[in-house]
Amino acid sequence: MVGRPYDCLANPLGAVRFTFDKAVSSGSDPASFDRNDWGVADLFREFLFDNDGLTQVPMLTPSTIKWIQPNSLVRFRGMIQDMLGNEFYVGAYKNNDTWNTNKFTDVSQYPMGASSDTRVWERRLLYCVPVPGQNSWVYATSDGQANMYASPASREKRQRDDCFVSDEVEMQDLNNEKLESPSAKKMRECGSVLSESMTEGTDCGMIMVPDFDRNNFPCLVKIYDTPESDLKLNDVFEFIGVLTFDTDVKNDELEPEHCFDQEELVNLPPSKVPRLHCLVHRKLLPDDLIIRPPTMEPKPHLMKEIRQSLLQHFTVVLGGDDLAANFILLHLLSKVHVRVDSIAVGKLSLNLTGFDKSSISVFRNRINDMLKNLIPFSQCIPLTVEYFNTASLAPVKDYQTNRLVPGVLQCAEGSHFTIDETQLQSGTLNSNGVENTRLLKDLMEFQKLEYDFKYYKMTMDADVQILILSEGKSNILPADIVIPFHPSSAGPTIVDEQTLNAWRWYLATVRSLPHSIGADMQKVVEDDMVAARQVDRSLGTEDFNRWLTMGRLMGVSFGETCLSHEHWQMVKEMERLRKERLIK
């Protein structure tokens, strides 16, 4: 059997050129290829997904970038933090009556004379970063997948092969009026620098790169042939494509404290921000980041067993408070599943009250550690007057660098915030503090965050979970559910990795289940709400919406997609016990 004439893994640009030459030879006009695919995407999807090539593609991380060779196929997982607009480049050009392409690369593969017949195309630029608040077990999953391909033998082979095949040709001065725009000129200059760094490398086995922190490892992703609506700010994606990275790094750039200066914030030098020319991408949800147990299926009996063990764990972490444990479970399963006017239906924020200095010192860390072990993205915000007055919670547009400066609350869908109010003392809020208070309140109440573009504000939808730890009921952040915290002891919370993986799978799986209320149960729920309203006239629409949300979450927590009478009674009992605590 004859093998492929190209290596998708080690030489993806060879596969690009092969499909381009095939398309041109069949009579296709290169002018028609702008924002159109000539068979590259299908070829790589077949390699990655039909032929199980995805497991062979190394994950681009701060550790793997030290041995991954430029122009090879890589994967990068990250959140779209900023959209930098479009970039012009010479997509196709004619050389000696032969058409060539520069698609998926920053450097021309062959000389480009001043009189070359060229086609100027566009590509989108996305500034992507590791997901804010991403927990260590998610990194371990990514690193483990990357290390599947990172054996010493394979690394040495790729380094030796690269010594022989990296014979790139320096991009020539185009002198073409169509490319005399500043952005195009800058693109050519950056391409020339990158070409020189690739041809003047020293020892192929020694790649000098800066020391990246895994929480601050940006990647400039270049997007081709994709509708703008498919890629949105704050979405988490896995991008698979061709890596270009300037390995000719100066010694001062290797220092960890070497940060971006003003010019670098604008130009994003390739020695500090790797480029990935995207061939294939796919949106990732939180459940795509977990290790899926191969033998587990979402059957009701299995979900009930896992639910029970997870509740027992929550109860131990919360010092024996089983009622708080049940509310924590529903809280962690909540998500916005529909928006009706300004109401985000499905959210369930939670306020645990009754903390003092001694209890918060114990249970804050226990709760945070519990969340870090179970949820892909989580952050803890200790609220103080100083924090309110000085923090940047919302993203702000910087027009000098033409960049969106991220804020603390810019995060991915499914992120969890724990707000610690126990350190909040009396004080005066400045204008920034007042604005930050409003931003947090709007995020909790409406699941929306306002982005500051200086001359105007833009409101973006969010879908985050918010847990508040406080001494009394929070007056700053009114949660959907307030429950006094009643711990009795603080036992050990050691859990093995296999059990944690099962719990992570359970939370991600049931959270994604659809749910409905049948006609019979809807009548029961409505009757119960009417009866409750007759007893307590203070109950309003928000209370009834909360009950419906709790009913839906209670059903899915058992792996069921329709509310049953038994589960509705459990919700009513939880509400009864909660109100008893509030009265005491």
Image (cartoon, rainbow, N blue to C red):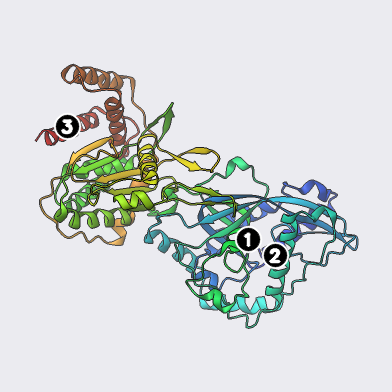
Which residue in the structure is indicated by mark 1?
A: 267
Numbered disc in front, either 1 or 2: 1
Locate residue 576, reporting x and y percent. 15, 31
Looking at the image, do the residues carrying marks 1 and 2 touch, with CB atoms under 8 Å apart? Answer: yes
Query: Residue 199 lies in what quarter of the image?
Result: bottom right
Residue type pointed to by label 1:
Asn
Which comes before the other along the chain, label 1 or label 2? 2
Marks 1/2: CA–CA distance: 9 Å
Which of the two residues, 134 or 552, is positioned nearer the viewer here? 134
Which residue in the structure is indicated by mark 2?
A: 190
Few, some or many residues within 10 Å of mark 3 (<14, 14–19, 20+): few
Which residue shows up at 33% across the image and 52% down it? 387
Marks 3/2: CA–CA distance: 65 Å
Q: Secondary structure at mark 2?
A: helix
Which residue shows up at 51% across the image and 38% down it? 458
Locate residue 288, reporting x and y percent. 45, 51
